[in-house]
């Protein structure tokens, strides 16, 4: 599948996969100087890219495991959604969960873009839902194993 992508700046980097089998495409910070994120702070990091996700798909903006585990940096909304009709800049809202200032470097990988299919549905309001063995059990009700 080909996806149209537009560089909004001369310094924007194209998304790249870290390996041939990687599901996510690394996306880079398009900033002119390092960006400091204070503990508990959320900042918007531009990528300098806009994409045209095909109908029937969305772009998921996910964390990079290295940033999350080593620096405590993650997308503020955990997973960002890029709808197929959005044509603006991809921006990662990054949150610092650590107790130290963290720095995002110029051109640093800040997240991953994963293109995923979805089902467009309609909702049918009913008075009752069908019964299942699980019923209303949730939040660990099925055990820990």
Image: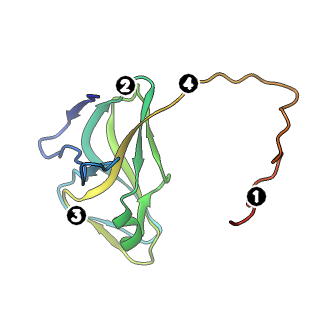
Residue at the right extreme of this rendering? 127
N-term mark: 3 or 1: 3
What is the secondary structure assignment of the residue under circle 2? loop
Q: Is residue 88 left or right of residue 13?
A: right
What is the secondary structure assignment of the residue under circle 4? loop
- Dot 4 alpha-carbon crowd within 10 angstroms: few under 14, some 14 to 19, many 20 or more: few
Q: 98 above or below 35?
A: below
**Which residue does the image show at 40% across and 70% down from the upper left?**
69
N-term mark: 4 or 1: 4
Q: Which residue is mark 2?
A: 54
N-term mark: 1 or 2: 2
N-term mark: 4 or 2: 2
Question: Quadrant of the rendered structure where residue 38 is?
Answer: bottom left
Please identify, in this view, whether the residue under mark 2 or under mark 3 is nearer the observer: 2
- Dot 1 alpha-carbon crowd within 10 angstroms: few under 14, some 14 to 19, many 20 or more: few
- Contact between labelled residues 1 and 3, with CB atoms less than 8 Å apart: no
Q: Which residue is mark 1?
A: 142
**Which residue does the image show at 22% across and 47% down from the upper left?**
16
Q: Position of residue 14 (x, y in %)?
A: 19, 43
- Dot 2 alpha-carbon crowd within 10 angstroms: few under 14, some 14 to 19, many 20 or more: some
Quick one: 6 or 40, which is closer to the camera? 6
């Amino acid at each position: 599948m080909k996806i149209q992508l537009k560089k909004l700046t001369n310094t924007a980097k194209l998304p790249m996969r870290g390996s041939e089998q990687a599901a996510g495409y690394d996306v880079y910070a398009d900033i002119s100087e390092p960006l400091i994120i204070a503990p508990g702070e959320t900042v918007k990091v531009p990528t300098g890219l806009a994409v045209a996700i095909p109908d029937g798909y969305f772009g998921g903006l996910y964390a990079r495991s290295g940033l999350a585990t080593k620096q405590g940096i993650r997308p503020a909304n955990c997973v960002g959604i890029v709808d197929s009709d959005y044509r603006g800049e991809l921006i990662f809202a990054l949150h610092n969960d650590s107790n130290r200032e963290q720095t995002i470097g110029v051109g640093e990988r800040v997240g991953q873009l994963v293109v995923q299919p979805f089902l467009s549905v309609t909702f049918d309001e009913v008075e009752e839902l069908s019964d299942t063995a699980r019923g209303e059990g949730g939040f660990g009700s099925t055990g820990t194993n």
